[in-house]
Amino acid sequence: MTAGVRGGSALVVVCAVAGLWAMRVGYAQSSSDPRATLKPGLKDAGQASRNMTLIATRPKPSGFVDPNAPTGAVIPPEPARGSASTSATSGTTTTPSDTDPAPSPPSASGGDGSNASTEKPRAPAFDPKLANQASFTNSDLAFSGRHMFVGNYHGFNIYDVEEPKNPHLVASIVCPGGQGDVSVYRHLLFLSVEQVRGRLDCGTQGVMTAVSSERFRGVRIFDITDLKQPRQVAAVQTCRGSHTHTLVPDPKDPETVYVYGSGTSTPRAGDELSGCSAADPKDDPNTSLFSIDVIKVSTARPQDAAIVSRPRVFADPSTGAIAGLWKGGTHGEGTQSSRITNQCHDITVYPELGLAAGACSGNGLLLDISDPMNPVRLDAVVDKNFAYWHSATFNNDGTKVVFTDEWGGGTRPRCRATDLPNWGANAIFDIVDRKLVFRAYYKLPAPQTESENCVAHNGSIIPVPGRDIMVQAWYQGGISVFDFTDSAHPFEIAYFDRGPLDAKKLFLGGYWSAYWYNGNIYGSEIVRGLDVFRLNPSEFLSQNELTAAVLVKSATFNAQQQPRVTWPDNSVVARAYLDQLGRTKGIAADRAAAVRSALDRADSARGASSVAATEQLTALARELERDATSASAIDGKRLKLLAETLARRVARTQ
């Protein structure tokens, strides 16, 4: 097993890299950062932004907020324990507050699947009052065409975002069960359900007994042909519920889609769902732990959806033991306590490459999904600074993965000036020969307060050609946009943040997710609702680069499904590469000037002058190819991409 961070000399290297990165992004966490001192408030909090503009905001619709407690319940103080915030050598004790992936009370979610890093999971005693309390947390987003789907612990909402500055509500669907993560495939919408209050009939009355035939925990499927009246057409029950899910289209049959269900709760009783078991694998080889669910769905007959396999992706290949990865606990003095790997939180797929990246509690995984029904593990990594591997994002080339660590479970302040810069952060890995190779960490470079839950959370790639740029939510830490083109030296290029919900009390709030979709950034705000942003040109990002990104139009967006992005043969794409090469001094000034002049001529030329312009572009493309052979790796790649763009530009006119 390849280790993202090992002991001995490798640890020194990683610390050195982290130190260089800290200098690059200014992780000294100076209080001079405007995000550090924002005014608190629910509706009138202070705001700070750099290189991005808030263009629209919408509150949560009626019925998706408790008017008597719009910010939800106060999060109680953490249990007393040795602090990991102020000392790199104090260590930490795994507690539910550190590891629960869901902010609901344990009885509402059915437990998190591991009450301690190395202990056998055990469900808390059933409390009908706690189990059925309402929750109105905004969760994840999905897009299809002009519509955005906003998940919520109480159901989901549909917005028309054809005019990003004026999103309007199309429909609200009440169907409680948390956590409400959504995805879309053609005319079907998929909804994750994990809480024990979920009902088969979407009722709001909850379920009052520990075992019930009325309870639903798994993946709901809705027909959204009529967006104003979605219909539930299937409900696939799973043993651990569905905390999140991933869509994987069948490469041989577009009418079939597979759903990877990631359940993180304690397995339910076999009396409620036959075959479910929370037993140790030594006692029960068919335990519901240490696997994922694979559901097969026909778009023509979604009502027939069913689990078709439960791959043991954590197994030891040499012994066959299904509990073959991280066993839980600390990695030594001064390290994090990482969760036992008996579940995945997120699995992000890149179908065109046949790859998936799994963020699986105590490990990061790289999977071969060329056979979607039977994913195969290619590599697994551990990191002594990660508490809970939460989510994963590929770059567009599929040569890098950004993994996130949800230290504190999303409900705790983990971005304070005293918190370690490599705890609750992103870990950036290169993919080399189908193995994961650690390069650097990235963490929000602005200190947050004790009343702001903050840690790395969900984000997506921004399709700027020639660069790897990601927008990411950090709960009450706001939104951060960072560049990881050089995977060893990520740096922030834009941000938006609001002040805490309350000056002294801690509430679950902030951005659950932030995604780029067809030219804008959309943020799902847990308490406040929905925000839409526009990126602005800056010293880090040129207008040509932004325009090239906006040229990319997607028919759908699902958080855990990444398609390959391609750019049109447009002169602005070539100019974006020129801007990047000029920024890094990766191209001679006279060569850049010649390319710009040739593009200007080609864009305006007609007749004989058009022939001359294309001949000049062809000659320049050859020269750029030669220049690439002596350039740095990153600049060499950009020079080749620029040459290819010019060549395609010529071919388009012939």
Image: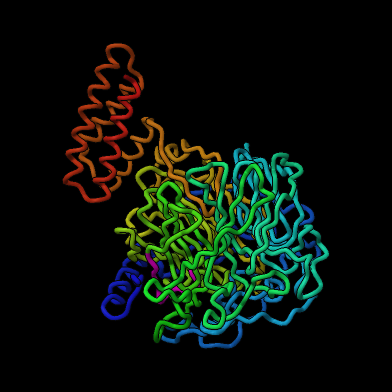
Taking the spot 80% from the left edge, 74% from the top edge, the residue there is: 209
State whether residue 579 is above or below residue 120.
above
Q: How many labels does the image show?
A: 0
Judged by its main secondary structure, the magenta piece is loop
Is residue 380 inside the magenta stretch? yes
Which quadrant of the view contains residue 110? bottom right
Q: In which quarter of the image is the C terminus?
A: top left
Residue 241, position as x, y percentages in the image:
64, 66
- For this orientation, the residue located farthest to the right is 205
State whether residue 237 is above or below residue 302.
below
Residue 58, position as x, y percentages in the image:
68, 49
Is residue 304 inside the magenta stretch? no
Taking the spot 43% from the left edge, 61% from the top edge, the residue there is: 376
The magenta segment is 379-389
Give 286 or 492, whichever is nearer the viewer. 286
Q: Is residue 316 left or right of residue 624?
A: right
Which quadrant of the view contains residue 268? bottom right
Give 314 or 571, whichever is nearer the viewer. 314
Residue 513, position as x, y percentages in the image:
57, 57
Taking the spot 52% from the left edge, 62% from the top edge, the residue there is: 346
Residue 506, position as x, y percentages in the image:
65, 73
Q: Is residue 174 left or right of residue 44?
A: right
